[in-house]
């Protein structure tokens, strides 16, 4: 059996802190979210097949980075006495979920509406946590309004209030300055080799994530050490096989819509965001019993938004053994639902009996190799020239769009910049054509790749 080594409680590697934004409906959470993240009010994910309103975003402020999550409104207005216990239970459940997943909590209240019984209930719950909590009073448009609107909120008994206007920006800079000062510091663990392939396992509860990890560890008979991760309840496991280091990151199960309350559904996804930040490659486990679901495609969309390599793993394949029609149906449905990640390898296996699991590590190594590849500029420019000659871009207002040259600007995933005279006018279909061409010519059939267009810098004439 693999040897396990006890380690100190240090993080596996750096990841951004999670800041949860909680509060009643209509207190201005979305407005504050959009101001802090500098985003539009209804941002839709451009990833094909995963259209959704954004519920989180990365924020960079004063050399610090965190993930801001809009947790949705705490549903509690003035209710009849007989409904108070039910509503109190909902408030408690929603608030405790937000606090449990976050490193820091922003509790937003409405300065114009005044302090409410719900604000008292939530404050009482927040006092029980040892995490930093910022009590923010919104809709205070300037300092002159503070003497009239702020005093009632001191009845909550909190030490400090942060008056802001999410709409106009008053006080937001001061709030962020104080917030980043309270973000937890993540230390690097010397136990994680720098060349580790970081693999996060995603999937719904009972899909077999932990069983697959245990199967891989048990069969390989290599040295293993447990490294506490930076998430609150996961242990990262380091596996070394044939001089290759694999860091296996287990994640909480992504719950299915309909089996949980919709307002709590996002918390199970929030839990996976940290793992996405920390991994190079995501393994999406799908049950052969249930097939691919909307929630699976949503998680796959998150991986592509973060630019991660991806492998689709259909587990419990033993349950459909001997039934070719069912097997064919599962594969067809999976292919249809995941067309936007057509490069992702698909593996069928059984974590229970181990059949097919021997393909996992070789596939991971192959995907990771492509994920990290770099290419010389002259080769890339030859590919670009050939692509343009075979299929020139369309005209823009009667003028030819010129793609001048290209270079690779980063790997993990391979990302290429193409300099053009009218980069904003290049049609998405031509963008897709170039991606497909580069993928074929560079033999990058198992990794995401990115192409960005940049405008040619024009020389200024001095007279």
Image (cartoon, rainbow, N blue to C red):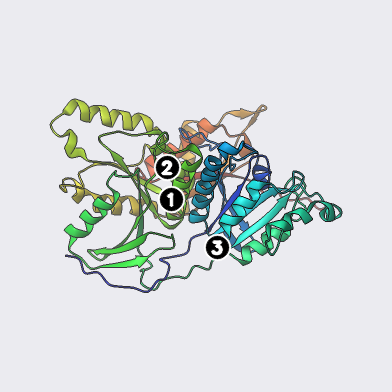
Element on which disc 3 rests: loop
Provide the residue designation for mark 1: 272
**Disc 2 marks which residue?**
299
**Is residue 223 found left or right of 84 in the rendered image?**
left
Residue positioned 35% across, 69% down in the render = 193
Q: Nearer the viewer, residue 441 or 65?
A: 65
Q: Residue at x 35, y 63 (%)?
A: 196
Q: Where residue 132 sits: x, y (%)?
A: 59, 63
Query: What separation in Å lies between label 1 and label 3 (alpha carbons)?
Result: 20 Å
Judge depth for marks 1 and 3 and give the one in front: 3
In the displayed structure image, the side of residue 321 where residue 405 appears, left or right: right
Which residue carries the number 3 mark? Answer: 131
**Crowd tier of the residue under label 1, counting other residues whose Cα lies within 10 Å: few below 14, some 14–19, many 20 or above:** many
* 3 or 2: tag closer to the N-terminus: 3
Residue 209, given in percent of the width and then of the height, sits at 29, 49
Q: How many marks?
A: 3
Q: Position of residue 47 (x, y in %)?
A: 49, 37
Disc 1 on helix, strand or loop? helix
């Amino acid at each position: 059996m693999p040897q396990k080594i006890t380690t100190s409680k240090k993080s596996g590697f750096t990841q951004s802190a999670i800041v949860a934004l909680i509060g009643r409906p209509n207190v201005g959470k979305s407005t504050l979210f959009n101001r802090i993240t500098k985003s539009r009010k209804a941002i839709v994910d451009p990833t094909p097949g995963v259209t959704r309103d954004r519920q989180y975003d990365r924020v960079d402020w004063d050399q610090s980075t965190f993930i801001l999550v809009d947790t949705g409104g705490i549903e509690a207005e003035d209710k009849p006495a007989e409904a108070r216990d039910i509503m109190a239970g909902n408030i408690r459940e929603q608030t405790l979920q937000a606090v449990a997943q976050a490193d820091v909590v922003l509790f937003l209240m409405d300065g114009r509406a005044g302090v409410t019984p719900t604000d008292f209930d939530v404050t009482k719950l927040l006092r029980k946590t040892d995490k930093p909590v910022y009590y923010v009073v919104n809709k205070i448009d300037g300092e002159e309004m503070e003497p009239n609107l702020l005093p009632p909120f001191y009845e909550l008994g909190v030490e400090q209030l942060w008056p802001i206007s999410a709409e106009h920006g008053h006080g937001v800079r001061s709030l962020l300055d104080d917030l980043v000062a309270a973000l937890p510091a993540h230390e690097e663990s010397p136990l994680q080799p720098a060349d580790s392939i970081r693999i996060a396992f995603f999937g719904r509860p009972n899909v077999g994530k932990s069983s697959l990890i245990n199967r891989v560890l048990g069969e390989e008979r290599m040295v293993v050490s447990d490294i506490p991760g930076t998430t609150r309840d996961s242990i990262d496991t380091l596996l070394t096989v044939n001089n290759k280091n694999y860091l296996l990151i287990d994640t909480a199960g992504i719950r299915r819509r309909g089996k949980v309350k919709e307002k709590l559904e996002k918390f199970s996804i929030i839990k996976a965001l940290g793992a996405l930040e920390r991994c190079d490659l995501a393994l999406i486990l799908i049950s052969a019993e249930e097939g691919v679901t909307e929630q699976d495609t949503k998680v796959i969309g998150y991986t592509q938004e973060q630019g991660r390599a991806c492998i689709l793993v259909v587990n419990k394949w033993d349950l459909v053994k001997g039934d070719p029609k069912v097997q064919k149906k599962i594969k067809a449905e999976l292919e249809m639902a995941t067309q936007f990640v057509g490069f992702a390898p698909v593996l069928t296996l059984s974590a229970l009996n181990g059949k097919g699991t021997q393909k996992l590590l070789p596939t991971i190594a192959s995907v990771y190799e492509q994920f990290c590849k770099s290419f010389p500029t002259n080769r890339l420019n030859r590919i670009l020239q050939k692509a343009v000659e075979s299929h020139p871009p369309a005209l823009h207002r009667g003028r030819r769009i010129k793609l001048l040259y290209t270079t690779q600007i980063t790997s993990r995933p391979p990302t290429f910049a193409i300099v053009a005279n009218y980069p904003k006018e290049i049609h998405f279909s031509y963008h897709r054509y170039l991606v497909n061409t580069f993928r074929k010519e560079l033999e990058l059939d198992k990794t995401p790749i990115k192409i960005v267009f940049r405008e040619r810098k024009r020389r200024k004439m001095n007279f």
